[in-house]
Amino acid sequence: MTRLLNSLLNLLRDARNRLDYPLRQLVRWQRAGFRIAPRLRGDPFAALPAEDRPSAMALADRLIRTYHLEDFAAQTTPINYRENLFYLHLLESALEATPISLPETVRAADVGPSHWFYVQALAAVLRWWQTPRPRQIDLQGYEIDAYRVYADLHSRYDHALGHIRGLTGVTYIPRGFSTQPAAFHLIFMLFPFVFPEDHLKWGLPANLFQPRALLRAAWQSLQPGGALIIVNQGKAEHHAQRALLEAEGIPIRAAFRHDPLLFRYSLDRFVLTACRHA
Ligand SMILES: C[S@@+](CC[C@H](N)C(=O)[O-])C[C@H]1O[C@@H](n2cnc3c(N)ncnc32)[C@H](O)[C@@H]1O
């Protein structure tokens, strides 16, 4: 019975999405004026259990210093600060577990960045991971639903540009990702949809749900020696993602659950990495 109801709900979601997704693509809503309100003073880790706070603060300090995020830390909200540090810690752990060497100029793609609330972390890790001198970066975020309109009447695109602020070498691209053979050193897939229900709930039509084809496009777009970094939420997604990698013949280099010290989500975050042969 529940199964039947869920199928029915998904059919309704698809019918709605088949109407309003193309409409969004037609209207391409953008509005100037979205700004991140700066961080208020106070302890961003106040909500953590007392025993975790010293280690969270020490880790945050190290990340801010290593990745030169002092200005960002002073100019964002407490929640965005913590989420960026969580992503930064996760991405650093993923690179260390893989491991790869990054060239002086690194080309990277993020597949499905949504409103890119974590772009500061992503750009910082590319620029400063294991190097005393900053790298040049060319970071491209491909978002298939960039014109979704939020409650503040700004689009996802507006929010993404607000989060990018002054970052150089970072571009938000309002279209779906497709294969660009051997174009990138690194490709990120941070919470790609692996179950159709999530895809539908996020407002996309069912015919765009092609997780295996998207994974293949990402893999084929890596340079030899490049790496794919995938993050999923919860064990079920993690296992489904592993099955997709196996079905595509993509060898898994590292797989781990990320330590949630800096941000507690209801579902654990799991990392998978893969390297293309040099
Ligand atoms: C669960 S969200 C993840 C957002 C973000 N990466 C994060 O870490 O919170 C998945 C995103 O992928 C986007 N997406 C889905 N299929 C895509 C495709 N083929 N190309 C680019 N973006 C896609 C969706 O619109 C959505 O914004």
Image (cartoon, grey):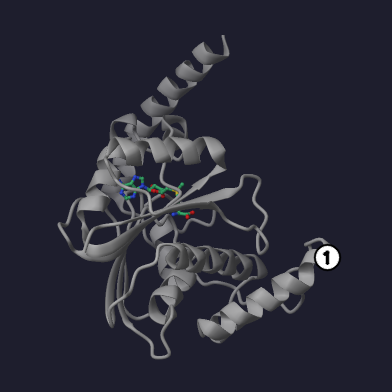
The quadrant of the rendering that contains the C terminus is bottom left
Vertical side of 234 occupied by 149: above or below: below
The quadrant of the rendering that contains the N terminus is top right
Query: Which residue has dot 1 on it?
Result: 51
SS for callout 1:
helix
Looking at the picture, tell me which residue is in the foreground, 169 or 50.
50
> In the current view of this chain or complex, which residue is farthest to the top?
1
Residue 162 x %, y %: 45, 70
Q: Residue at x 65, y 60 (%)?
A: 263
Direction from residue 217 to residue 160 in the image, left or right: right
Looking at the picture, tell me which residue is in the foreground, 122 or 14.
122
> In the current view of this chain or complex, which residue is farthest to the bottom?
133
Q: Does ligand 1 reach within 8 Å of label 1's beta carbon?
A: no
Looking at the picture, tell me which residue is in the foreground, 83 or 277.
277
Residue 194 x %, y %: 41, 37
Vertical side of 89 occupied by 201: above or below: above
Check disc 1 and give the amino acid type.
Answer: Glu
Direction from residue 268 to residue 100 in the image, left or right: left
Q: Is residue 84 visible?
A: yes
Residue 142 x %, y %: 31, 57
Q: Residues within 10 Å of mark 1 (few under 14, many from 20)?
A: few
Vertical side of 12 occupied by 63: above or below: below
Q: Residue at x 41, y 40 (%)?
A: 242
Q: Residue at x 46, y 16 (%)?
A: 8
